[in-house]
C-alpha cells in the first residue's frame, strides 16, 4: 500500500468502484421498502474520507503503509443496523459467525463508541470488503456524536491542505 499514491491506476480503480456504488439503484430506498423493525442505513465512503484513511495508514501506527490495501479500504461500502431490542455483543457476534461464512466480526468499542462491526470477505484480492455496523438503539446518540468527532479529523486535515495549496 505504501506506493498507492504513486500508482494512478490503483487510485482510479478505487474511485471508479466508488462511483459504481454511488450509481447503483438507490440501495437506501430499497432497504426502506423492507419495512424492517430496525433502522437500516447505507453509504459509500466519500473521496476525502478515503484519502484521509490512506494518509493515516501511511503513518507509523500502521507500519508506514505496509498494511495490506484491503485492510485500509475495508469500508468503502457500509451498512448500519440500529437494533430496537437490546442484544449483547456476544449474541450478535455468535449469530453472525454461525449464520454466515467468510465474515470477520469484531467488537469495535472505543471510548464512547459501542458497536459490532462485520466485514464480508471474498476469497480473492479482486474486490473490496463491505462493512456492517450493528448498534443497539440505546447507543445511537453517543455513537453518532463519537463518529462526528472522529469525522472532523479528516475535515480539519482537508481544510489545512486547502490553505496550503
Image: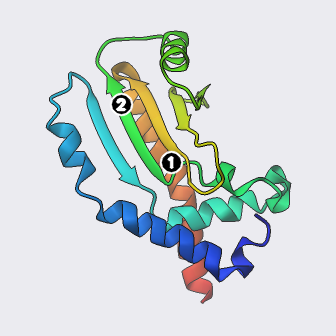
SS at mark 2 in the image = strand
Place of residue 160 in the rendered image (x, y in percent of width and height, measured from the top left): 59, 75
Q: Which residue is mark 2?
A: 81
Q: Residue at the location (63% across, 42% down)?
A: 123
Would residue 90 be found to the left or right of residue 32 on screen? right
What crowding class fits label 2: few (fewer than 14 Cα within 10 Å), some (14-19), or many (20 or more)?
some
SS at mark 1 in the image = helix
Place of residue 149 in the rendered image (x, y in percent of width and height, measured from the top left): 50, 48
| Image quadrant where one finds the C terminus | bottom right
Foreground residue among 74 and 103: 103
Foreground residue among 55 and 41: 41
Q: N-terminal of the two: label 2 or label 1?
A: 2
Q: Outermost residue, front direction?
A: 123
Q: Which residue is mark 1?
A: 149
When the figure is inspected, residue 107 is found, relative to residue 41, above or below; the finding is above
Foreground residue among 106 and 48: 106
When the figure is inspected, residue 114 is found, relative to residue 11, above or below; the finding is above
Would residue 38 be found to the left or right of residue 53 on screen? left
Q: Residue at the location (62% across, 79% down)?
A: 9
Would residue 1 be found to the left or right of residue 116 on screen? right
Q: Is residue 107 at least partly visible in the picture?
A: no
State which quadrant residue 33 falls in: top left
Foreground residue among 89 and 126: 126
Amino acid at each position: 500500500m505504501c506506493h498507492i499514491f504513486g500508482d494512478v491506476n490503483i487510485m482510479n480503480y478505487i474511485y471508479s468502484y466508488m462511483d459504481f456504488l454511488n450509481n447503483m439503484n438507490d440501495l437506501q430506498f430499497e432497504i426502506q421498502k423492507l419495512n424492517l423493525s430496525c433502522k437500516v442505513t447505507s453509504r459509500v465512503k466519500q473521496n476525502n474520507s478515503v484519502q484521509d484513511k490512506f494518509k493515516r495508514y501511511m503513518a507509523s501506527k500502521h507500519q508506514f503503509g505496509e498494511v495490506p490495501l484491503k485492510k485500509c479500504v475495508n469500508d468503502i461500502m457500509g451498512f448500519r443496523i440500529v437494533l430496537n431490542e437490546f442484544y449483547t455483543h456476544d449474541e450478535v457476534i455468535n449469530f453472525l459467525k454461525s449464520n454466515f461464512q467468510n465474515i470477520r466480526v469484531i467488537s469495535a468499542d472505543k471510548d464512547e463508541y459501542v458497536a459490532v462491526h462485520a466485514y464480508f470477505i471474498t476469497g480473492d484480492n479482486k474486490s473490496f470488503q463491505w462493512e456492517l455496523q450493528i448498534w443497539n438503539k440505546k447507543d445511537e446518540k453517543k455513537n453518532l456524536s463519537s463518529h462526528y468527532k472522529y469525522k472532523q479529523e479528516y475535515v480539519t486535515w482537508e481544510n489545512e491542505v486547502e490553505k496550503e495549496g
